Image (spheres, helix red, strand yellow):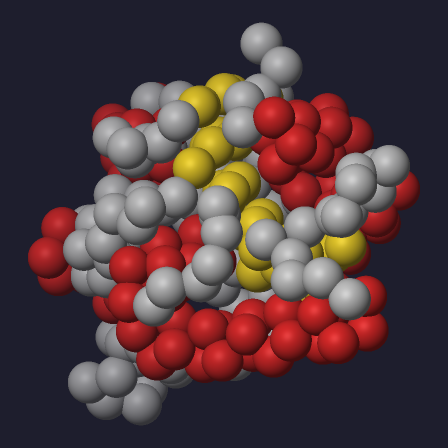
Amino acid sequence: MVERPPLVVLVHGFMRSGASMLPMAVGLRRRGFVPRLVSQWNFSTEIPDLADGLFARVMRMRDVVSRTEGYVPDVHFVTHSMGGIVVRSMLSRHEIPGPNRVVMLAPPNRGSRLAQAMHGRWRFPWGEFDPVRKLLPGELGSCATAGDPDAEIGIIAGEAKGAGGFPWTMLGPASDEPHDGKVALDEARLDSAKDFIVVPRGHTFIMASPEVIEQTAAFLRDGAFNH
């Protein structure tokens, strides 16, 4: 059991909900943490707005733990995919008492070339609005420019054989590079990350892997993965 356990906020990916992080929440609770699921409508909402909304919810969660448990918890985060970009933006825009540790699962930290391929080839029926624009590489999107927060960040990237079907093949020759089916390994990297590991898992269900849950708990507890 973790003494005076930290609050661990689980932030889901693009067009998912907090329910997608339930296996991770169950695994962390069994290891003595206090996990909390959040759900955000992130299809049409921009990253800074998601970050501000998440900050308000995190501070309310922290206050509840303080009132009910009698101590002010550190706040850590476990994120999936675009959820990592939201947390990067939040911690860059707002101060949450810590230390803060963040485990990012399959994050498109440098943007997504798959999103760029979709953006370039598909015309959406609602006009200029493009929900994948925020996932584009470079300054066109919000991933590479989300900020570099003062937090301990560990990244778990996936590399899964057989995860390269449509729409990954839209990338043409680039589809041969290591990836999890949606995010390439080099897109997951962040220069300031404290630790980085690769697991043989696909993008969609990486958070449900027992190995990933164990590694996540290790980083939250010790600030490093088990290599």
For the point 54% across and 22% down, the residue is 224
Horizontal side of 216 relative to 173 (left or right) equals right
Q: Is residue 143 above or below residue 52?
A: above
**x and y percentages locating residue 14 in the rendered image:** 49, 63
Q: Is residue 82 above or below residue 37?
A: above
Q: Could you tell me if residue 125 is visible in this image?
A: yes
- Name the residue furthest left: 139
Q: Which quarter shows the C terminus?
A: top right
For the point 72% across and 62% down, the residue is 71
Horizontal side of 64 relative to 85 (left or right) equals right
Considering depth in this image, is 47 or 170 the residue closer to the camera? 47
Q: Which quarter shows the N terminus?
A: top right
Q: Is residue 15 above or below residue 168?
A: below
Number of numbered callouts drawn: 0
Residue 30 picture quarter: top right
Residue 131 picture quarter: bottom left
Considering depth in this image, is 199 or 11 the residue closer to the camera? 11
